[in-house]
Amino acid sequence: MRLKTIAHSPRLHLLYGNLRDSPAITRALKEAQPDEIYNLAAQSDVGISFKCPEETWEVNYAGAKRLIREAMRICPKARIYHASTSEMFGTTPPPQNELSAFAPVSPYGEAKLKAYRELVCGYRAKHKLFICSGILFNHESSRRGEHFVTRKTTLSLAHIKLGLQKSFALGNLEAKRDWGFAGDSVRAMHLMLQQKTPKDYVIATGESHTVREFVEAAAKELGMTIRWSGKGLREVGKDAKGRIVVRVDKKFFRPSEVRDLRGDASSARKELRWKSHTSFKQLVRMMVSADLKNVRQQMH
Ligand code: G4F
């Protein structure tokens, strides 16, 4: 949720905090005295983590450690949810579940794995802390940051459809992701903290699509058909009139890539009675129509 929206909700009370600042965490926890803590704070951009590895480690591992250690001291009964990620599976082939091997290939995945092993599994065993982790696969919505591939695509295509932009550039079109709706994932986070015993769960739809398929599906929602031609960095996607709408640019490729993510959420289905309620098509439609509306509003 955008900060502006939160700040205006009468049911929510915002406290200033910063995972890089222990006194700030201490003060916020003392004031809030929470029953449940959801640690979703992160440097969450995998691509940026290659450029800023120390910052990523500092927030995603060390920041989580500050928060969890302070919570153990100030509100030891609080139940804690910590956001883990499918990026921890890295090169392990799909379908990935809670028993799959971890093999991260990015500073982001490495920092998240360290936090998972030490702070979630380790502290749970050593300190009997009620802490769980959702190993979330990609979770998207119209609130997604504009530099992530789904939102970048829906927003760019909405601009193109309304004549405000000619084309946009992407990196690896072949990467496969298990794209679900963020709202479904948040429901799973809450369910985890309502269980008798703390455990970790893979949260995923079980279906994966390539970036290319996401672009095609989003374009289709706007009544556009993309035809691909060329190879590698010379590949382009053209509309029905032969105009280039998608290009490939090497600056959007990562030094190392997680090629194929598809989660097996059988445990969550069985034990949490959770399932994804939103299909890939519904997700794409939701994101495209929100961006079309956003862009139209900005035009007026
Ligand atoms: O949208 P992405 O940047 O998401 P990514 O890297 O999968 O990470 C997201 O999901 C994780 C859960 O699995 C979270 F832990 C993480 O915090 C984040 O929310 O990239 C998706 C795929 C990648 O393979 C990337 O290489 O799209 C490919 N891609 C191709 N062109 C691009 C682009 N990604 C971005 N961001 N921008 C491009 O132009």
Image (cartoon, rainbow, N blue to C red):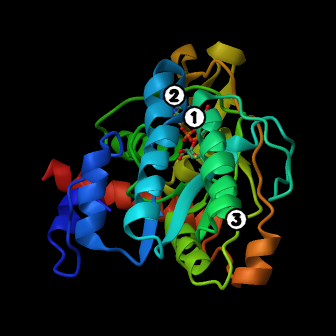
Q: Is mark 2 within 8 Å of ligand 1?
A: no
Packing grade of label 2 (10 A; few <14, some 14-19, many >=20) is: many
The answer to whether 118 is drawn above or below residue 50 in the figure is below
- Amino acid type, residue under disc 3 in the picture: Asp
Query: Which residue is disc 2 drawn over?
Result: 49
Q: Say which element carries label 1.
A: helix
Q: Say which element carries label 3.
A: loop
Q: Earlier in the sequence, mark 3 or mark 1?
A: 1
- Residue name at image x 80 percent, y 73 percent: 267
Q: Which mark is residue 222?
A: none
Q: Nearer the viewer, mark 3 or mark 2?
A: 3
Q: Say which element carries label 2.
A: helix
Packing grade of label 3 (10 A; few <14, some 14-19, many >=20) is: many
Q: Report x, y in % for residue 168.
A: 45, 29
Q: Which mark is residue 108?
A: 1
Q: Quadrant of ligand 1?
A: top right
- Of residues 290 and 143, the one drawn nearer to the viewer in this rendering: 143
Residues under numbered marks 1 and 2 in contact, where contact means CB atoms less than 8 Å apart: yes
Query: Which residue is disc 3 drawn over?
Result: 200
The answer to whether 210 is drawn above or below residue 268 in the figure is above
- Residue name at image x 75 percent, y 37 percent: 90
Q: Is residue 148 visible?
A: no
Q: Is mark 3 within 8 Å of ligand 1?
A: no
Q: Report x, y in % for residue 80.
A: 51, 67
- Residue name at image x 53 percent, y 65 percent: 81
Q: Is residue 6 visible?
A: yes
| Mark 3 and mark 2: Cα distance apart in space | 24 Å
Q: Quadrant of residue 12?
A: bottom left
Q: Is mark 1 within 8 Å of ligand 1?
A: yes
Q: Report x, y in % for residue 108.
A: 57, 34
Q: Quadrant of residue 289?
A: bottom left
Quadrant occupied by the N terminus: bottom left
